[in-house]
Image (cartoon, rainbow, N blue to C red):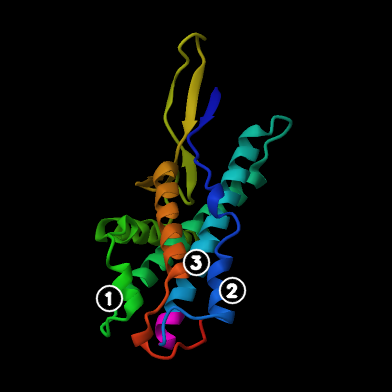
Amino acid sequence: MYIEFDLPEIPEHAAGFPQYWLKSIFIQSPSNRYQINALTSTYVRLVETALVEYHSGTVKLREFWGTHSSLNLGAMHRSMSHFETCISNMYRATNCFRRLRRDRQQDPLSQELNVEKASFATDLVAARFRTIRNEIHHLEEMVMDGRIADGQPFALKADGPEVPHPTEPNQTIKTIDRLVIGTREMRFAELATLLKEMASVAVRIAEFRPNSSSGTHGRGAA
């Protein structure tokens, strides 16, 4: 069996968003309200962590399939743990972003974030994050309670289609292109696209400048 990957990298945000933290600490927070600053800092922190976990997951996944001298199950297990944390943090970041946009006092930053539609924050995508996250946690609970049936999947796994090799008889090509848990799945390409969009929102927040009518800005963004 030959292995191929459809596993996009996200190198453009490898350093996270230092501009947000530097501006919040030394220059100006995004809002004059502590609650908004708390939400923005939580959002940026979770997106940063999700990016790190996604990268770590891809590295360990390639390491597993690239190890030929032994069965490197440790790399596979660590990869899945990284992706579980990535999805959980993306779900939590999505909740923060949706709360920011629904601010009842119409904070200037909230108005700015409503200018463009964010795919990751739609009801459909947010529900998928929630479902996969809940599936991860519920399966763990079922394992602990002894409710897992024989042969039932009990963890997130990387998978993809396997097709006959076009020129080598009795040989196949398997493309690792998605995460699967139970009946739920999400392709890496989609995960990467959503992460990039979340990262672009973090950059917009970092670059946001409250107008002069918004009052005296407050610290407390961390």
Residue 138 seen by the camera: no
Q: Please identify the residue farthest to the front as the structure is shown.
A: 212
Up-down: is 84 above or below 64?
below
Amino acid type of the residue tagged 2 in the rendering: Leu
Relative image position of residue 65 (x, y in whole percent):
61, 34
Considering only order in the chain, which callout, 2 or 1, is on the residue closer to the N terminus? 2
Quarter of the image with the C terminus is: bottom right
Measure the alpha-carbon separation of dots 1 and 3.
Answer: 19 Å
Quadrant in the rendering for residue 115: bottom left
Q: Which mark is residue 46?
A: 3
Amino acid type of the residue tagged 1 in the rendering: Arg
Magenta-drawn segment: 33-37
Query: Which element is circle 2 on?
Result: helix
Q: Compare residues 16 and 158 and report the one nearer the observer.
A: 16
Relative image position of residue 58 (x, y in whole percent):
57, 45
Q: Main secondary structure of the magenta part?
A: helix
Considering only order in the chain, which callout, 2 or 3, is on the residue closer to the N terminus? 2
Measure the alpha-carbon separation of dots 3 and 2.
Answer: 17 Å
Q: Which mark is residue 199?
A: none
Amino acid type of the residue tagged 3 in the rendering: Leu
Query: Which element is circle 1 on?
Result: loop
The residue carrying mark 2 is 22
The residue carrying mark 1 is 102
Q: Is residue 35 magenta?
A: yes
Q: Is 61 displayed left or right of 169 in the figure?
A: right
At a point 57% along the width and 56% down the height, the residue shown is 52
Considering only order in the chain, which callout, 3 or 1, is on the residue closer to the N terminus? 3
At a point 32% along the width and 75% down the height, the residue shown is 110
